[in-house]
């Protein structure tokens, strides 16, 4: 089999594989989804977000518990007691000794008690403050998880759009190479083109066909990745309805840095954790001050069950007390608690400063990437138009015999590459905009 025959076999195999792949993919379920729909689906089923929501709910319960410690404690009780001794009971009376059995005794009591800590070195109120800070940190952590998931969906969605657009570029390239093969074959049959020119055109068609197959595989991989993020069946097909036409922004770097420092949830979480650790230092000083508590109670103890809830005045009793306590020696607990709290506060402060520096670096890099991508898009648009005009010129020159097949094939490759560069420029610009939005605390 000659070289022409082998190329023909390659083309037939590719066409057969393409038809089979198309038939198989046509049977798969395809769903048209916008970017916002994909984000909503990912947020609904994301396990990390569900766990962060639970953590925020627990922080809310901890805050309620802290407030409860600042309120007085109220209790009520009602008791009934019956006692009886088995065996003889001796009662000594004057000039008489009586022997009998114990008939048993019953006691009834009811009471209400109220107690409250009046002063504990500010521990209770610092605990409330720390609970509020921890609650805000948990909510910021949840928002950061939401923003991160939305960002992942954006990048995966834009990647799928890029691969679809690159497939269209390759389809156009294959159509041009096939058309050129027809022209070259006709000229070869007429004797105005050499066999080498025809073989070069056939090789170009085979290479473009292979590239198209690779683009199709890249689309499947992008769909797989997006489905994984959205917790869907990875075999489901996706048809994006949004485009990659990016919207420019007029915000400067200083404004972006200000917004990120104010709104970025990861940085807000870090700051709240630092504030909570600082509050913990004050809480550790509680044992350095005395504790004052007060209590009062009201109760009644009738002699019979029929008087249990009649509240007779002769059955009532009242009590009130106030106490003060101070730990003179507690086994070095004061020192160790304070030292641990200071170490935790120092670690949290350094962590916040590191997070702030990292965020500023990310914002600056995202802004530079956006500025560069915007200029690259302008260059890529000019390059694509220039390559298209050059392609038209080389086609006309080749038709007139003023240029060789190599110059025409180079123009075809240049056009395909410039169109691919334009698609990549759109992707880079959208990614830079997504990076800036995430750094500024948005989706």
Image (cartoon, rainbow, N blue to C red):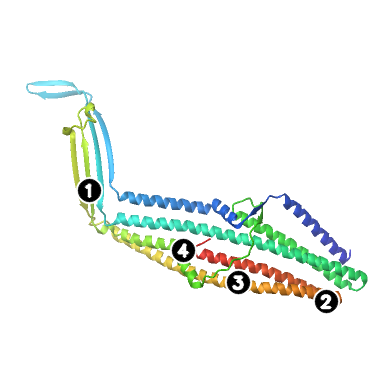
Point out residue 185 in the picture as x, y percentages from the top left corner. Answer: 88, 68
Q: Is residue 440 visible?
A: yes
Label 1 crowding class (10 Å Cα cut-off): few <14, some 14-19, many 20+?
some
Q: CA distance from mark 4 to mark 1?
A: 45 Å
Q: Are marks 4 and 1 in contact (CB under 8 Å)?
A: no
Q: Residue at x 57, y 73 (%)?
A: 371
Q: Is residue 183 left or right of residue 271?
A: right
Q: Earlier in the sequence, mark 4 or mark 1?
A: 4
Q: CA distance from mark 3 to mark 1?
A: 70 Å
Q: Mark 3 = which residue?
A: 374
Q: Is residue 84 visible?
A: no
Q: How many marks?
A: 4
Q: Residue at x 11, y 21 (%)?
A: 97
Q: Earlier in the sequence, mark 3 or mark 4?
A: 4
**Residue at the right extreme of this rendering:** 190
Q: Residue at x 48, y 54 (%)?
A: 52
Point out residue 342 in the picture as x, y percentages from the top left corner. Answer: 35, 64
Q: Mark 4 = which residue?
A: 263
Q: Earlier in the sequence, mark 1 or mark 2?
A: 1
Q: CA distance from mark 3 to mark 4?
A: 25 Å
Q: Mark 1 = which residue?
A: 294
Q: Are marks 2 and 3 in contact (CB under 8 Å)?
A: no
Q: Secondary structure at mark 3?
A: helix
Q: Nearer the viewer, mark 1 or mark 2?
A: 2
Q: Secondary structure at mark 2?
A: helix
Res 105 → quadrant: top left
**Residue at the bottom extreme of this rendering:** 402
Q: Mark 2 = which residue?
A: 397
Q: Specify the quadrant that holds the N terminus.
A: bottom right
Label 2 crowding class (10 Å Cα cut-off): few <14, some 14-19, many 20+?
some
Q: Is residue 85 left or right of residue 383?
A: left
């Amino acid at each position: 089999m000659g070289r022409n025959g082998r190329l023909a076999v390659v083309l037939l195999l590719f066409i057969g594989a393409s038809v089979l792949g198309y038939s198989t993919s046509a049977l798969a379920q395809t769903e048209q989804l916008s970017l916002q729909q994909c984000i909503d689906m990912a947020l609904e089923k994301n396990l990390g977000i569900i766990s962060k929501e639970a953590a925020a709910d627990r922080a809310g319960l901890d805050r309620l518990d802290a407030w409860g410690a600042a309120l007085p404690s109220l209790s009520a009780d009602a008791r009934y007691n019956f006692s009886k001794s088995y065996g003889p009971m001796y009662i000594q009376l004057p000039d008489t000794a009586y022997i009998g059995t114990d008939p048993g005794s019953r006691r009834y009591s009811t009471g209400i008690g109220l107690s409250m800590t009046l002063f504990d070195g500010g521990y209770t109120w610092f605990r409330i403050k720390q609970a509020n800070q921890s609650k805000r940190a948990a909510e910021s952590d949840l928002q950061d998880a939401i923003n991160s998931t939305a960002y992942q969906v954006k990048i995966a969605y834009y990647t799928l759009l890029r691969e679809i657009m690159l497939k269209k570029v390759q389809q156009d390239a294959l159509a041009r190479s096939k058309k050129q093969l027809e022209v070259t074959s006709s000229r070869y049959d007429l004797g105005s083109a050499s066999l080498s020119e025809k073989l070069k055109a056939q090789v170009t068609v085979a290479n473009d066909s292979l590239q198209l197959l690779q683009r199709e595989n890249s689309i499947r991989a992008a769909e797989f990745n997006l489905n994984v993020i959205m917790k869907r069946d990875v075999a489901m097909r996706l048809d994006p309805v949004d485009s990659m036409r990016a919207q420019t922004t007029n915000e400067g770097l200083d404004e972006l840095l200000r917004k990120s420092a104010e709104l970025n949830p990861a940085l807000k979480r870090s700051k709240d954790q630092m504030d909570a650790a600082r509050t913990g230092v004050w809480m550790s000083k509680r044992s350095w001050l005395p504790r004052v508590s007060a209590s009062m109670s009201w109760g009644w103890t009738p002699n019979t069950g029929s008087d249990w809830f009649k509240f007779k005045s002769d059955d009532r009793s009242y009590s009130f007390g106030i106490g003060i306590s101070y730990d003179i020696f507690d086994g070095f607990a004061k020192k160790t608690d304070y030292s641990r709290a200071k170490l935790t506060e120092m670690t949290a402060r350094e962590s916040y400063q590191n997070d702030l520096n990292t965020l500023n670096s990310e914002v600056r890099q995202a802004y530079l990437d956006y500025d560069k991508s915007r200029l690259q898009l302008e260059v890529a648009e000019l390059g694509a138009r220039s390559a298209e005009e050059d392609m038209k010129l080389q086609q006309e020159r080749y038709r007139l015999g003023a240029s060789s097949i190599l110059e025409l094939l180079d123009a075809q490759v240049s056009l395909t590459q410039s169109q691919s560069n334009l698609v990549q420029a759109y992707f880079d610009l959208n990614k830079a905009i997504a990076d800036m939005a995430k750094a500024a605390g948005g989706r």
